[in-house]
Image (cartoon, rainbow, N blue to C red):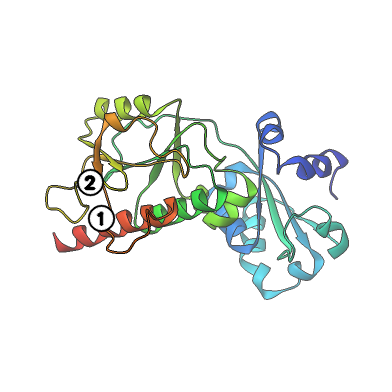
Amino acid sequence: MLSSRLRKLIALLDNRHSRKKSGLILAEGLRCCQEAVVRRPDWLEAVLLTSAFAASPASAAILAKLSELGLEPAVLSEHEFGGLTETEHPQGILAVLRRPEATLPSSRPEPFALILDQIAEPGNLGTILRTAWAVGLSSVWLVKGGADPYAPKVIRAGMGAQFALELAWFPDLAAAAGRLLGLGGDRLWCAMPQAELSLYDDRFSLAGGGLVIGNEANGISAPELGTAVTIPMPGEAESLNAAQAATVFLCDCCLRRRRQ
């Protein structure tokens, strides 16, 4: 059974203030919940399923993992479950998790630090986190002032990447740059349109350094902290959006590593 307290909390978890106050976050959908259950079982507070999903083959792996953990999911009717979700066509599963405490990295990220400077659009932030995970990064650094990486929309856009990555928060870009240097990191690179240096230039290398992706509207908050680098574009578009730009840089890093 679902307690009235938890029911009320779930209804509020799309609000950033409520997530901070309650210390809980919400993951919805099969892929996101699979990542949460498998990778962060110690964060789990509750798992809710529709009766139809619980009876489907898709639920087998999750139910087996929950049984292994000694956790009993709450099985709800379609109508009751629908009242708790914000998606138009819910997949029949959501997980309530304890939000992790903010931490600072204790060692230099390998092969480099990805620093997101106040990325504001939930879809962009989630996409960048998923791409970072896909190319093999183990952590992402975030400058405060952007979207909440644990907001339901960001978790859906990231397809659960938040549960695979270590996320670190910094009050400003200067603090992140200082931490990188303090951990033995090298140069800070700032992704900026119209910069003189191209990411395809041999002088550009992310190894041991940091890459900053800036806010969609305002760009990088303190570009003087690093060296500007750009994605050369022969077309007339002023720039790519933040998630697209991050993907180009991250995939270029993968290509360089394969060539080594």
Q: Residues within 10 Å of mark 1 (few under 14, many from 20)?
A: some
Q: Amino acid at mark 2?
A: Leu
Tag of residue 169:
none
Quadrant of the snapshot with the C terminus: bottom left
Judge by depth and name the residue closer to the eye, 207 or 52: 207
- Please tell me whether residue 5 is drawn above or below residue 250 in the rendered image: above
Given residues 183 and 204, the one toward you in this image is 204
Disc 2, disc 1: CB below 8 Å? Answer: yes
The picture places residue 22, in percent across and down from the top left corner, at 71, 32
Q: Which residue is mark 1?
A: 253
Report x, y in % for residue 51.
Answer: 81, 66
- Return the x and y of residue 213 as percentages of the image width and height: 38, 43
Q: Residue at x 74, y 53 (%)?
A: 72
Circle 2 SS class: loop
Which residue is label 2 attached to?
206
| Left or right relative to 151: residue 224 | left
Kind of residue at badge 1:
Cys
